[in-house]
Amino acid sequence: MIDAVHMRAELASVLLNSALVRSPVMARLLRYLVETSISGDGKTLKSYSVAVDGLGRSPDFDPQTDAYARVQVARLRKLLDAFYAKVEPKPTYRLLIDSGSYEVRLAACHVARAARPFVRSSRFTLTGNHVAKWQLVAGIVASLIIAAGLVLFWRAESNAATAQWQINDFPFVDVTVSDETGGQSQTGLARRLRESILMKLDKYEGIRVAYASTSASNYSINVTLERAGDVVRENIMVIDRRSNRLIFSDSGQSQVTDGDIDLPGTEFTAKSLFHIVHPTGIIHSAERKRNHPLETPYGCLLRFTAQIKNGLSLGDSDLAQCARNWHAAAPNHPFATGLYGWTLIDASLSQVTASGRQRSVQNAIDVLESGKALNPNSPFLQLAAMRAYAVAGNRMAMHAAAARALTLNPDNLDIQGVAGVTLTLWNDPEGEALLNRAIREHFNPPPWYFVGAFVSAMMREDNEGAGRAIAELTALQHSLAIRPILSAALEAHTGHLDQARASWNQAVAMQPILAIKPEAFFKRMPMAPEVRARLREWLAPVLK
């Protein structure tokens, strides 16, 4: 039986090697081979899976004509041998990839010891001084041995702690598409639809996508096609493989033929996949019931996505701690970096002084820009950077990050919603269009989306629209006094002063600074100056 703990600890140690730090391709390959070996599938690994899943090659990779996987594994094998030839002190076990195999196993490190030459010593008599000196030497040696043991123990503990953050424990999802027309299991249309689904899934950062069918998958997305002329009906089912239970099904129609150039099922497929894999969707909701530990990558991600639904990440010390630990152990991971930057912005909002707040925001921006340079195709990093620039008041950088996130995953309604709210608070006309679409098409829009809807209505002097937004905001649970402030603004603007004062008193109870320096609170809100001015104008009757 494979010792997963020791193997992951040794993996963490090896990944600190400068050769692997400089080569993310080799690091990714080693992680993939180790995790696949731990799962029990190492012996059956094929060149195709290694190339596509481990090295990121496209699904049309042909292992018969392309030796890329074998060449890269041979290179990795040499890197491991070189590492263990030089590393000191020698570990008890090492990671080994046998020639002709893709499986990684733990093997004992055999350190050759040269035979010590026999030297005949001259006879001498121990004196008291000799005994004292030898006792002193023995004490020093014993102390060194104990210190070395403590260092090795600390290193093993540290490696194990680091290793738990470097595993990829996100849900593993595979896809099958069958065309039931004429009893055929595969057609050109089915293949193109599967490719389309895989490409769309690959843009969601909370899952792992299996490009080839594997027994290690946690969930299967199964699609069957029924055709009548140029009308194609797609039937989508999601199976939880661990319980062999159907957890989602839906159907939709498309006008598609085999001769179409475009990939099929665009709108229906995109909406269904969002429902399945978005942060509070089908798969992640099923995983929450499994109580993943917070001190793991996926457990930390689930904590964040649960909190962000109501905007409750602010002040969550456990979330901030797991984000720090994850980023410290895996600083190149896009989600670890994005989440760490997000919590740094949360921390900046509670800074007492303006200078302290500016330093915190700049620290977050530095972290996020470094992450974006390493992971330019991460939508979440772009969203986190957009939020940071909004707090910093940099409109141009905020808008650029939002545009990049939308380009990277245009089907993700959460990206549209987050970008829409942020841009709306900065009085950007594009924000309202994005937000309206996200609210209209999202099967369960988070209540804080309606903060943006209120602001857009307020800037148009649309009292009815602002009222509808307030009604939706009743479900918002937030540590900041957002909902009662907006309620007080609308009630004061429409002449309901008693109700406005009651809402304002509720806001003051939540944020006492509002009773002393309301302007100091408003300055911290990531809003355009003209939006802040309009909000103060609506609140004027209760601020007198």
Image: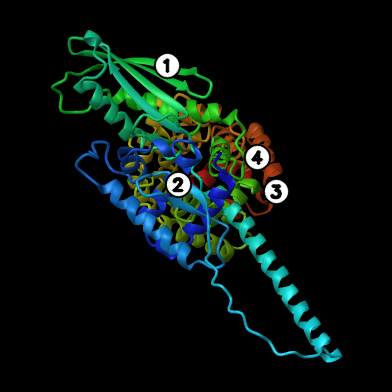
| Residue at the spot 30% in from the left edge and 24% down from the top edge | 267
The quadrant of the rendering that contains the N terminus is: top right
Q: Nearer the viewer, mark 3 or mark 1?
A: 1
Amino acid type, callout 4? Trp
Question: What is the distance, in whole Å, between disc 3 and disc 2 at their CAs?
Answer: 59 Å
| Residue at the spot 54% in from the left edge and 26% down from the top edge | 286
Secondary element under disc 4, as helix, strand or loop, is helix
- Circle 1 residue: 249
Q: Earlier in the sequence, mark 1 or mark 4?
A: 1
Secondary element under disc 3, as helix, strand or loop, is loop
Residue furthest to the right in view is 128
- Circle 2 residue: 104
Secondary element under disc 2, as helix, strand or loop, is strand
- Residue 60 seen in the current view: yes
Mark 3 crowdedness (10 Å alpha carbons): few <14, some 14-19, many ≥20: some
The image's mark for residue 352 is none
- Image coords of residue 258 (percent x, y): 16, 20
